[in-house]
Amino acid sequence: MEFGEQLRTLREERKLTVNQLAIYSGVSAAGISRIENGKRGVPKPATIKKLAEALKIPYEDLMKKAGYIEEIREARETYSTSCKLIEKAQSYQLEDLSLLKKEKWNYLSKEDLVMLDNYFAFLSDEAKKRTDNE
Protein backbone atom coordinates (compact mmCIF):
# COMPACT_ATOMS: atom_id res chain seq x y z
CA MET A 1 0.00 0.00 0.00
CA GLU A 2 1.34 3.42 -0.98
CA PHE A 3 2.06 6.03 1.68
CA GLY A 4 -0.85 8.23 0.54
CA GLU A 5 -3.30 5.37 0.91
CA GLN A 6 -1.95 4.62 4.38
CA LEU A 7 -2.26 8.26 5.36
CA ARG A 8 -5.88 8.34 4.18
CA THR A 9 -6.65 5.15 6.14
CA LEU A 10 -5.13 6.60 9.31
CA ARG A 11 -7.03 9.86 8.87
CA GLU A 12 -10.32 8.08 8.25
CA GLU A 13 -9.80 5.74 11.23
CA ARG A 14 -9.59 8.86 13.37
CA LYS A 15 -12.73 10.23 11.70
CA LEU A 16 -10.96 13.36 10.49
CA THR A 17 -11.64 15.24 7.30
CA VAL A 18 -8.76 16.48 5.14
CA ASN A 19 -9.51 20.00 6.36
CA GLN A 20 -9.44 18.95 10.03
CA LEU A 21 -6.12 17.17 9.56
CA ALA A 22 -4.81 20.29 7.83
CA ILE A 23 -5.83 22.49 10.75
CA TYR A 24 -4.37 20.13 13.37
CA SER A 25 -1.12 19.52 11.49
CA GLY A 26 -0.40 22.84 9.81
CA VAL A 27 -0.05 21.03 6.46
CA SER A 28 -2.29 22.46 3.76
CA ALA A 29 -5.47 20.57 2.85
CA ALA A 30 -4.36 20.63 -0.80
CA GLY A 31 -1.01 19.11 0.16
CA ILE A 32 -2.67 16.35 2.19
CA SER A 33 -5.08 15.66 -0.65
CA ARG A 34 -2.21 15.40 -3.17
CA ILE A 35 -0.34 12.99 -0.88
CA GLU A 36 -3.41 10.81 -0.35
CA ASN A 37 -4.24 10.72 -4.06
CA GLY A 38 -0.69 9.83 -5.06
CA LYS A 39 -0.17 13.09 -6.95
CA ARG A 40 2.68 13.99 -4.65
CA GLY A 41 5.40 11.66 -3.46
CA VAL A 42 6.32 10.87 0.10
CA PRO A 43 6.58 14.11 2.09
CA LYS A 44 9.69 15.27 3.91
CA PRO A 45 10.29 14.08 7.49
CA ALA A 46 9.29 17.50 8.89
CA THR A 47 5.86 17.18 7.25
CA ILE A 48 5.53 13.59 8.43
CA LYS A 49 6.26 14.77 11.98
CA LYS A 50 3.42 17.30 11.80
CA LEU A 51 1.03 14.68 10.42
CA ALA A 52 2.04 12.10 13.05
CA GLU A 53 1.43 14.57 15.87
CA ALA A 54 -1.97 15.54 14.45
CA LEU A 55 -2.93 11.87 13.99
CA LYS A 56 -1.63 11.08 17.49
CA ILE A 57 0.62 8.27 16.32
CA PRO A 58 4.35 7.81 16.95
CA TYR A 59 6.51 9.71 14.47
CA GLU A 60 8.65 6.61 13.93
CA ASP A 61 5.59 4.58 12.88
CA LEU A 62 4.69 7.09 10.18
CA MET A 63 8.33 7.32 9.09
CA LYS A 64 8.31 3.53 8.64
CA LYS A 65 5.14 3.73 6.55
CA ALA A 66 6.82 6.42 4.45
CA GLY A 67 9.84 4.19 3.89
CA TYR A 68 12.36 6.38 5.69
CA ILE A 69 13.01 3.79 8.39
CA GLU A 70 13.34 0.09 7.77
CA GLU A 71 11.63 -2.09 10.37
CA ILE A 72 14.10 -4.85 9.52
CA ARG A 73 17.02 -2.78 10.77
CA GLU A 74 15.32 -2.23 14.11
CA ALA A 75 14.43 -5.89 14.46
CA ARG A 76 17.90 -7.03 13.41
CA GLU A 77 19.49 -5.21 16.35
CA THR A 78 17.71 -7.29 18.96
CA TYR A 79 16.99 -10.45 16.98
CA SER A 80 20.22 -12.31 17.63
CA THR A 81 20.34 -11.65 21.38
CA SER A 82 16.63 -12.36 21.82
CA CYS A 83 16.84 -15.61 19.87
CA LYS A 84 19.78 -16.88 21.89
CA LEU A 85 18.03 -16.04 25.17
CA ILE A 86 14.78 -17.68 24.05
CA GLU A 87 16.64 -20.75 22.76
CA LYS A 88 18.45 -21.07 26.08
CA ALA A 89 15.18 -20.78 28.03
CA GLN A 90 13.53 -23.35 25.74
CA SER A 91 16.40 -25.77 26.26
CA TYR A 92 15.48 -25.73 29.97
CA GLN A 93 11.74 -25.67 29.22
CA LEU A 94 11.44 -22.17 30.74
CA GLU A 95 9.62 -20.34 27.92
CA ASP A 96 7.26 -18.62 30.38
CA LEU A 97 9.93 -16.65 32.24
CA SER A 98 8.93 -13.11 33.11
CA LEU A 99 12.28 -12.07 31.66
CA LEU A 100 11.03 -13.04 28.18
CA LYS A 101 7.82 -11.02 28.34
CA LYS A 102 8.69 -7.78 26.58
CA GLU A 103 5.74 -5.85 28.03
CA LYS A 104 7.33 -6.24 31.48
CA TRP A 105 10.37 -4.29 30.26
CA ASN A 106 8.27 -1.13 29.77
CA TYR A 107 8.30 -0.42 33.51
CA LEU A 108 12.08 -0.49 33.96
CA SER A 109 13.88 2.78 34.52
CA LYS A 110 17.44 3.51 33.45
CA GLU A 111 18.62 2.66 36.96
CA ASP A 112 16.69 -0.62 36.87
CA LEU A 113 18.36 -1.57 33.61
CA VAL A 114 21.82 -0.77 34.97
CA MET A 115 21.10 -2.90 38.05
CA LEU A 116 19.79 -5.70 35.83
CA ASP A 117 22.90 -5.50 33.66
CA ASN A 118 25.16 -5.66 36.72
CA TYR A 119 23.25 -8.61 38.10
CA PHE A 120 23.36 -10.38 34.73
CA ALA A 121 27.12 -9.83 34.53
CA PHE A 122 27.49 -11.27 38.04
CA LEU A 123 25.36 -14.33 37.17
CA SER A 124 27.27 -14.89 33.95
CA ASP A 125 30.61 -14.68 35.72
CA GLU A 126 29.45 -17.13 38.41
CA ALA A 127 28.13 -19.55 35.79
CA LYS A 128 31.44 -19.36 33.89
CA LYS A 129 33.36 -20.10 37.08
CA ARG A 130 31.16 -23.14 37.76
CA THR A 131 31.62 -24.35 34.19
CA ASP A 132 35.39 -23.85 34.34
CA ASN A 133 35.56 -25.85 37.59
CA GLU A 134 33.66 -28.82 36.16
Image (cartoon, rainbow, N blue to C red):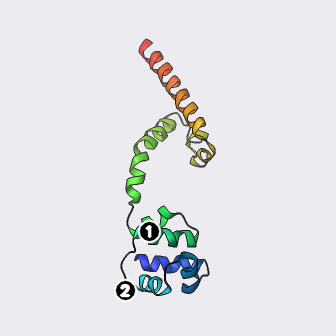
Residue at the extreme top of the image, as rendered: 133
Is disc 1 placed on a helix, strand or loop? Answer: helix
Q: Which residue is drawn at 58% across and 77% down?
A: 24
Task: Please determine whether, in this image, residue 122 is positioned above or below residue 59.
Answer: above
Disc with the residue nearer the chain's start (1 vs 2): 2
Q: Report the mark closest to the observer, 1 or 2.
A: 1
Left or right placement of residue 27 versus residue 115 in this view: left
Residue 109, x across and y down, in percent: 61, 41
Q: Residue at x 57, y 81 (%)?
A: 23
Q: Residue 45: name its quadrant.
A: bottom left
Determine the CA span between mark 1 and mark 2.
19 Å
Given the image, on which type of amino acid does mark 2 rest?
A: Lys
Residue 99, x across and y down, in percent: 58, 39
Given the image, on which type of amino acid does mark 1 rest?
A: Ala
User: As rendered, which of 43 and 12 lies closer to the eye?
Assistant: 43
Residue underneath mark 1: 46
Looking at the image, can residue 29 be seen? yes
Task: Please determine whether, in this image, residue 73 is positioned above or below residue 124.
Answer: below
User: As rendered, which of 91 and 46 lies closer to the eye?
Assistant: 46
Q: Residue 34: name its quadrant.
A: bottom left
Residue underneath mark 2: 39
Task: Please determine whether, in this image, residue 64 is positioned above or below residue 99.
Answer: below
Is disc 2 placed on a helix, strand or loop? Answer: loop
Q: How crowded is mark 1: few (under 14 residues within 10 Å), some or many (20 or more)?
A: few
Location of the C terminus by quadrant is top left
Residue 21, x across and y down, in percent: 56, 80
Location of the N terminus by quadrant is bottom left
Q: Which residue is drawn at 55% across and 67% down?
A: 57
Residue 8, x across and y down, in percent: 50, 81
